[in-house]
């Protein structure tokens, strides 16, 4: 994508890449989403092991990054109906383990597409997904799999994810905006992965992350959460287990 305002940049080509993307993820996601232990442990591997799969969209009229995308590659190339409940966390661990074991990459997998709030509702999401697909196609992969975070599910945290993904618009597209983006460029919605992220923290940490108080044990609806967070004040432990949705893009022409 290149027009009078935007063009794609990569960490391999732009020496200022990391400076340009600083702060974008923080601006794009709820605070608690930045405390997934798998991401904390493995994030640098995206750029150390899979740099060619990372890119961003630069608004070069003002020198700001409007959107950021991360993907990687795994050895798995099985039946899409067997994709695991672990979702996002599973993919990240699997990619690093496969690389360490010298297993050949067979499938591209999305990690995130983050759009800066100032650039939402400008049609950038589809361009980012299409460019991610292009990377996989150039690598010769047959599929791009994505454990999609259906952001609008946060408006309905008490609705079961398996039911939520059946909701449709009047045009028979997925109700959820991010699922709709993937569907419009040809992805299949396969199934929910119910344990895509496992985020844990003390009561004090959750109060800091959410700006809420948790005076007793129980389930709490938190801003930006796709499901309630469960707090146990006796154990001083809050647990948020996020569901995502497996989608599959066929890349072979």
Image (spheres, rainbow, N blue to C red):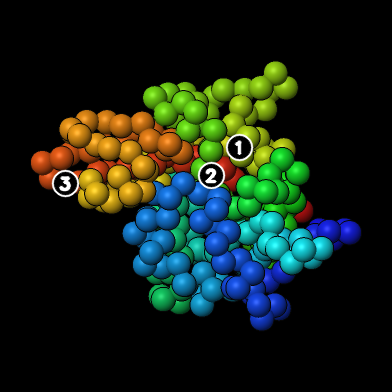
Helix, strand or loop at mark 1: helix
**Name of the residue lying farthest toward the right:** 4
Residue highlighted by disc 1: 179
Residue 62 figure quarter: bottom right
Residue highlighted by disc 2: 148
Helix, strand or loop at mark 2: strand
Neighbor class of circle 2 (other Cα within 10 Å; few <14, some 14-19, many 20+) is: many
Q: Say above or below: 181 vs 199.
A: above
Q: Say above or below: 137 vs 244.
A: below
Task: Identify which residue is drawn at 71% across, 40% down.
Answer: 121
Helix, strand or loop at mark 3: loop
Neighbor class of circle 1 (other Cα within 10 Å; few <14, some 14-19, many 20+) is: many
Q: Nearer the viewer, residue 64 or 228?
A: 64
Whole-percent x and y of residue 98? Answer: 44, 69
Q: Nearer the viewer, residue 146 or 201?
A: 201
Asked if labels 1 and 3 touch by Cβ distance under 8 angstroms, the answer is: no
Q: CA distance from mark 3 to mark 1?
A: 35 Å
């Amino acid at each position: 994508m290149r027009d009078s305002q935007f063009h794609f940049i990569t960490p391999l080509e732009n020496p200022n890449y990391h400076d340009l993307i600083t702060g974008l993820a923080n601006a794009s996601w709820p605070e608690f989403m930045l405390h997934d232990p798998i991401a904390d442990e493995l994030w640098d591997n995206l750029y150390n092991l899979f740099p060619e799969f990372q890119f961003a969209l630069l608004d070069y009229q003002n020198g700001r990054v409007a959107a950021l995308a991360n993907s990687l590659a795994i050895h798995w190339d099985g039946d899409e109906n067997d994709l695991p409940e672990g979702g996002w966390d599973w993919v990240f661990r699997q990619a690093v383990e496969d690389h360490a074991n010298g297993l050949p990459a067979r499938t591209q997998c999305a990690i995130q597409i983050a759009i800066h709030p100032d650039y939402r509702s400008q049609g950038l999401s589809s361009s980012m997904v299409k460019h991610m697909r292009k990377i996989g196609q150039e690598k010769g992969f047959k599929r791009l799999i994505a454990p999609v975070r259906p952001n609008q599910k946060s408006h309905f945290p008490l609705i079961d994810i398996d039911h939520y993904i059946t909701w449709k618009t009047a045009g028979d597209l997925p109700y959820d905006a991010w699922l709709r983006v993937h569907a419009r460029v040809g992805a299949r919605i396969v199934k929910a992965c119910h344990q895509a992220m496992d985020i844990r923290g003390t009561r004090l940490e959750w109060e800091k992350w959410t700006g809420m108080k948790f005076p007793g044990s129980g389930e709490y609806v938190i801003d930006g959460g796709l499901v309630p967070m469960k707090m146990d004040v006796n154990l001083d432990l809050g647990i948020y287990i996020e569901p995502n949705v497996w989608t599959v893009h066929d890349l072979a022409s």
